[in-house]
Image (cartoon, rainbow, N blue to C red):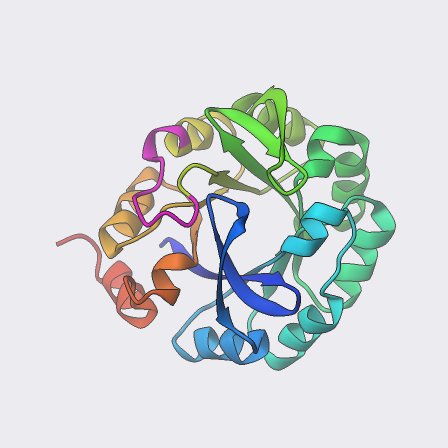
Amino acid sequence: MLEIIPAIDLRNGKCVRLYKGDYDRETVYSEDPVAMAKHWQSLGATRLHVVDLDGARSGLPMNSIVISGIVQALNIPVELGGGIRDLDTVEQMLNLGLQRVILGTAAVENPGLVHDACARYGQGIVVGIDAADGYVKTRGWKEKSTVTAIDLARQMEALGARRFIYTDISRDGTLTEPNFESTAQLNDSINSPVIASGGVASVEHLLQLNQLGVEGAITGQALYTGRLDLKDAIERLRAGPK
């Protein structure tokens, strides 16, 4: 069954959401990310996805105190992306108690890091592929690369990556719908599990992603605006398509 993974995006220590990754189009949803994390756990979340937006832009984790607080407050695993671009930082973040860290920019700019990190930490490493119009974007989604999402996934899988998070930037925070076509293409192009992100706005979207065979779906905006009820969505997925 598809795992529904609530997202907490951190900026300046607060829980926020961006529209299509635009730092100038930010909505603050909570001044207390730890309380928000506990809320999602209480509704049945089995995992939490955290993004350090400040870290994604600066290249170094910037919200470590808050991240540590979230990890310590929860009984469910937490994964983190944003600003993790060397092996020392990977180790530091995992030492906070995180189950997984996500390498995105580093996958494009420093493939050797992915190889070394996967060799050392195995399933603790996830490669994040953030794409617009099929091409990967890096450094907090500010820079467009010349590599396609599928090509990058295949390259990273060859280097030892065993799990991927795929985000269609044009759908992120829009409450439209996931890019089912590109998600399916990526999922069918590699052997490793794929977690989908961007555009989830309804239980029907989650059911459709489940049919595609992806491992999980990250959702943020839909939960924070009330468009999606986490507890109800988990129950509906367990019940299967009607």
Q: Is residue 153 above or below residue 38?
A: above
Residue extending furthest top? 146
Q: Is residue 207 left or right of residue 11?
A: left
The image position of residue 183, as x and y in percent, is 41, 34
- Image-based side of 227 in relation to 111, left or right: left
Q: 12 above or below 207?
A: below
Which image quadrant: the C terminus?
bottom left
In-front residue for pair 62/28:
28
Would residue 149 be seen by someone viewing this image from the given angle?
A: no
Residue at the right extreme of this rendering: 88
Question: Magenta segment, which residues?
Answer: 172-182
Residue in the picture at 61% in, 59% down:
79
Q: Quadrant of the N terminus?
A: bottom left
The answer to if 84 sits in the magenta stretch is no
Q: Position of residue 39 (x, y in %)?
A: 45, 78
Q: Is residue 208 left or right of residue 162?
A: left
Is residue 96 among what the camera can see?
A: yes
